[in-house]
């Protein structure tokens, strides 16, 4: 198993929400690490999974939060990855070594998790925001999880959490997935859309609530990203946990997701870009 800068390079950036958790439902808990959210799904009694693995050097924070929520020596049944960007797999090796549990991702994301393929260098030209400008400094190297990583079941179920299914939502990455539960229309979005302007350092720090498409500097396929947002809007979710920004629900989610789905070309797609597939 090979590490890379995607799990080793600490990014000195944070938000006012870092270190805070929000219970979205009795068995859904969002926890912010620096500028990204991980999600705990399940209960101590019935078992739980971790969705995404935070930023590099954040494992201790995840371990501590798991113990607070589920008890001493709490251990998930599995780790589910929405995708393999550095801020979603940063602590994966430490978590894997401590917990010894299977890790799941989409088949098209596995090359980034088995050392075969790096992501493209982020495109600093897509936006005037400071984070966009410094984004080429973000690590994009693949990691190799070896036999620990598995393909998500082809029938759409999510291992170890009953009632959930994974939804293929590519565009931000080739194998990006979101998770959905029909009974309460709960949605774990990953980065298919976000609720903060992820290109602006000020808005990331302050966590100003706004609907946005996926982070521009790391999204190579905008036509597919738009279709993924339409797919999620058609689920009519009642609550959503995004990879970046605040969890949202009710009328705010309904109205703003419909707006994003309709006006994606105006809201989300950058007007310029050096290498990305703009419409």
Image (cartoon, rainbow, N blue to C red):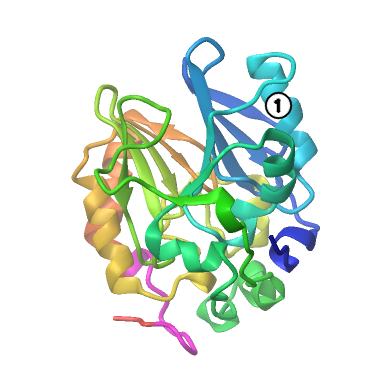
- Residue 11 in sight here: no
Residue lying at the far bottom in this picture: please name it: 274
Magenta span of residues: 266-276
Using the image as rendered, state which of residue 144 and residue 123 is in the foreground: 144
Horizontal arrangement in the rendering, residue 241 relative to residue 260 (left or right):
right
Residue on which the image places disc 1 = 65
Q: Position of residue 269 (x, y in %)?
A: 37, 72
Q: Position of residue 272 (x, y in %)?
A: 44, 85
Q: Residues within 10 Å of mark 1 (few under 14, many from 20)?
A: some
Using the image as rendered, state which of residue 64 and residue 219 is in the foreground: 64
Q: How many marks?
A: 1
Q: Position of residue 83 (x, y in %)?
A: 49, 56
Query: Taking 164 as reference, is 206 above or below it?
Result: below
Horizontal arrangement in the rendering, residue 111 relative to residue 221 (left or right):
right
Residue lying at the far front in this picture: please name it: 147
Q: Position of residue 113 (x, y in %)?
A: 55, 62
Q: Residue at x 64, y 25 (%)?
A: 75
Query: Taking 125 as reference, is 59 above or below it?
Result: above
Residue lying at the far top in this picture: please name it: 45
**Screen quadrant of the N terminus:** bottom right
Q: Residue at x 71, y 50 (%)?
A: 93
For residue 274: magenta? yes
**Screen quadrant of the C terminus:** bottom left
Query: Taking 216 as reference, is 211 above or below it?
Result: above
Q: Residue at x 30, y 26 (%)?
A: 163
- Residue 49 in sight here: yes
Horizontal arrangement in the rendering, residue 205 relative to residue 278 (left or right):
right
Residue lying at the far left in this picture: please name it: 234
């Amino acid at each position: 198993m090979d590490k890379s800068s995607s799990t080793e390079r600490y990014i000195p950036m944070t938000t006012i929400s870092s270190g805070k958790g929000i219970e979205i439902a009795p068995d859904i808990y969002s926890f912010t690490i620096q500028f990204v959210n991980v999600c705990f799904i399940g209960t101590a009694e019935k078992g739980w999974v971790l969705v995404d693995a935070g930023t590099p050097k954040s494992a201790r924070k995840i371990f501590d939060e798991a113990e607070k929520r589920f008890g001493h020596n709490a251990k998930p049944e599995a780790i589910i990855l929405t995708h393999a960007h550095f801020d979603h797999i940063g602590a994966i090796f430490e978590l894997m070594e401590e917990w010894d549990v299977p890790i799941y991702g989409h088949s098209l994301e596995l090359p980034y998790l088995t050392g075969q393929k790096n992501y493209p260098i982020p495109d600093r030209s897509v936006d005037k925001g400071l984070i966009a400008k410094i984004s080429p400094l973000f690590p994009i190297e693949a990691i190799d999880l070896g036999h620990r990583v598995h393909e998500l079941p082809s029938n759409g179920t999510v291992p170890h959490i009953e009632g959930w299914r994974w939804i293929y939502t590519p565009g931000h990455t080739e194998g990006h997935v979101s998770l959905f539960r029909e009974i309460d229309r709960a949605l774990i979005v990953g980065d298919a859309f976000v609720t903060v302007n992820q290109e602006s350092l000020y808005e990331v720090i302050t966590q100003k609530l706004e609907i946005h498409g996926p982070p521009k500097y790391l999204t190579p396929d905008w036509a597919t990203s738009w279709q993924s947002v339409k797919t999620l809007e058609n689920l009519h979710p009642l609550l959503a946990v995004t990879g970046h920004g605040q969890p949202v629900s009710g009328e705010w989610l309904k109205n703003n997701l419909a707006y994003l789905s309709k006006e994606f070309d105006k809201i989300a797609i950058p007007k310029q870009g050096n290498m990305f597939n703009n419409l």
